[in-house]
Image (cartoon, rainbow, N blue to C red):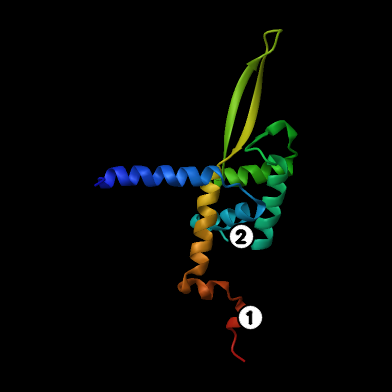
Amino acid sequence: MMSSETLSINNSVLIERERKNEYVTPESLSNAIIYAAKLKGITISEEASETVASEVMAFFGFYYECIDNYLENEDRQNMYLLEDLDLIRLQSDEVYLPDGQSWRITKFILNKNKVLEYSRQFYDSAKDPKNVYDSLSNDEWKRI
């Protein structure tokens, strides 16, 4: 018989194996943005999160890193928003040029595991019967 410690280690290994085969899509990133914002007490519309997710995923493509030099100011602001939501992290590397000067390269790295986790939790919270009223607009609450 396995101990509970061994079982929990095996479960985490299985979960990690499953996540390696998962990919971040604009839809999963959009859901993660809504969920992460809700955790921080911020309300963001589905339309706004879809726009940000699409724009951000256009820079990442099939990779999980994006170099800062490619970004315009508006795109960079979206990246900083996702960094505040813990969905992206910054990494800076310093490279020395042949003439001895240093060149700083800043990369945005998508936190794949956090995005997928928040996306799943977004779906789980949407299924919760207590949240059915959250989806109703103010107009639907008015009596006739």
Give amino acid for label 1. Asp
Can you give x and y, in whole percent of width and height, for residue 11 in the image? 38, 47
Q: Is residue 102 above or below residue 33?
A: above
Residue, disc 2: 44
Q: Earlier in the sequence, mark 2 or mark 1?
A: 2
Q: Nearer the viewer, residue 101 or 11?
A: 11
Q: Which of the image's four quarters has the C terminus? A: bottom right
Residue sitting at x 64%, y 50%: 25
Query: Dot 1: within a 10 Å radius of its alpha carbon, few (fewer than 14), some, or many (20 or more) residues?
Result: few
CA–CA distance between discs 2 and 1?
A: 19 Å
Secondary structure state at the residue bearing disc 2: loop
Outermost residue on the top side: it is 99
Residue 87: image quadrant is top right
Residue 68 spot, x, y in % from top left: 68, 33
Left or right: 19 in relation to 7: right
For the residue labelled by badge 1, is the local secondary structure a helix, a strand or a loop? Answer: helix
Q: Which mark is residue 128?
A: none
Q: Position of residue 74 (x, y in %)?
A: 73, 44
Q: Image point 49% across, 63% down: which residue?
A: 124
Q: Amino acid at mark 2?
A: Ile
Depth check: 92 or 117 in front? 117
- Mark 2, other Cα within 10 Å: few <14 / some 14–19 / many ≥20: some
Say which residue appears at 64% left-offset and 17% top-offset. Answer: 95
Residue 132 in the image: above or below residue 21: below
Q: Nearer the viewer, residue 129 or 141?
A: 129
Vertical placement of 122 versus 114: above or below?
below
Q: Is residue 128 above or below residue 80?
A: below
Contact between marks 2 and 1 (CB within 8 A): the answer is: no
Q: Position of residue 91 (x, y in %)?
A: 58, 30
**Residue beneath disc 1:** 139
Farthest residue toward the bottom?
144
